[in-house]
Image (tube, rainbow, N blue to C red):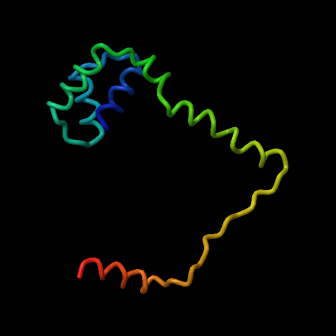
Amino acid sequence: MEYVYAALLLHKLKKDVNEANISSVVKASGTEVNESQVKSLVAALADVNIDDAVKAAPVAVAAAAAPAADAPAASGEAKKEEKPKDDGKTEEAAMEGLSSLFG
């Protein structure tokens, strides 16, 4: 995943997305570089328009929908805090059940 982030960072900064630059970014993050993964990513991105791919990503849709979820709270409606239900189980009872799985 760090290789994809490196490619996105390089693209955002208008730098060439190539093996040397991706390797440099990953090394700078303190991670060991796997050259075969870098080569695979560069080959996979060769025919991809990164701008179009970012615009089409479902994450952008989810981020745009998040402010709409907060709209009722902003209109003055009080949010109800949901408390987890206590079904009477204690942590010890849960651990006993878990230990029975493993003998």
Q: Residue at x 79, y 45 (%)?
A: 74
Farthest residue in the right direction? 76
The residue closer to the viewer here, 75 or 15, is: 75
Q: Residue at x 69, y 43 (%)?
A: 69
Position of 84 relative to 97 (above/below): above
The residue closer to the viewer here, 99 or 49, is: 99
Q: Quadrant of residue 10?
A: top left
Q: Position of residue 103 (x, y in %)?
A: 23, 82
Position of 60 relative to 92 (above/below): above
Farthest residue in the left direction? 36
- So how many labels did they put on this image? 0
The residue closer to the viewer here, 32 or 100, is: 100
Q: Residue at x 63, y 36 (%)?
A: 65
Q: Is residue 102 left or right of residue 57?
A: left
Q: Is residue 48 left or right of residue 72?
A: left
Image quadrant in which the N terminus is located? top left
Q: Quadrant of residue 6?
A: top left
Q: Position of residue 17 (x, y in %)?
A: 30, 19
Q: Residue at x 21, y 23 (%)?
A: 20
Q: Quadrant of residue 68?
A: top right
Q: Position of residue 97 (x, y in %)?
A: 37, 81
